[in-house]
Image: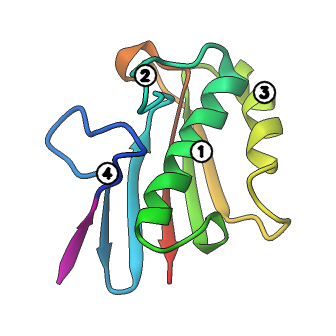
Amino acid sequence: MKKVINSSNAPGAIGPYSQAIEAGGMVFVSGQLPIDAATGTMAEGAEAQARQSLENIKQILAEAGLSMGHIVKTTVFLADMSLFADMNKVYATYFGGDYPARSAVAVKELPKGALVEIECIAVR
């Protein structure tokens, strides 16, 4: 059985998908764009965008009763690999040394012209 996770402290889905789904003790968080849920605006620059995407993930996980420490896998999508170092600098601050497995890929384009989008899988 699956459970939909939805936080008003993270931006709503911009398509036919859920912010997150919990199934079998795992929480699958959809890709989070760097949009501030309160203002609807997108942060500027790769560092600020990585921070906002991770903050959105943090809020969704909190809604599920989890923290960033429960994340076992992330996927980072970048508009260009030249943004990797800026994203990585911020990303490292969100985990206490036991980093989750991660993939980071450059894509042709992200929704709404974003530079960064991050998704994850967390385990209870």
* SS assignment at label 4: loop
Residues tagged 3 and 4 counted as in contact (Cβ below 8 A): no
Looking at the image, can residue 76 be seen?
A: no
Residues tagged 1 and 2 counted as in contact (Cβ below 8 A): no
Q: Amino acid at mark 3?
A: Asp
Q: Amino acid at mark 2?
A: Thr
Residue 73: mark in rendering: none
Calculate the distance from the C-alpha at mark 2 to the C-alpha at mark 4. Answer: 18 Å
Disc number lying in front (1 or 2):
2
Residue 39: mark in rendering: 2
Residue 86: mark in rendering: 3
Q: Which residue is mark 4?
A: 19
Calculate the distance from the C-alpha at mark 3 to the C-alpha at mark 1. Answer: 14 Å
- Of 24 and 60, nearer the camera is 60
Calculate the distance from the C-alpha at mark 3 to the C-alpha at mark 4. Answer: 25 Å
Which callout, 3 or 1, points at the residue further toward the start of the chain? Answer: 1
Using residue 28 as the reference point, say whether residue 74 is left or right of it: right
Looking at the image, can residue 32 be seen?
A: yes
Which callout, 3 or 4, points at the residue further toward the start of the chain? Answer: 4
Disc number lying in front (2 or 4):
2
- Neighbor class of circle 4 (other Cα within 10 Å; few <14, some 14-19, many 20+) is many
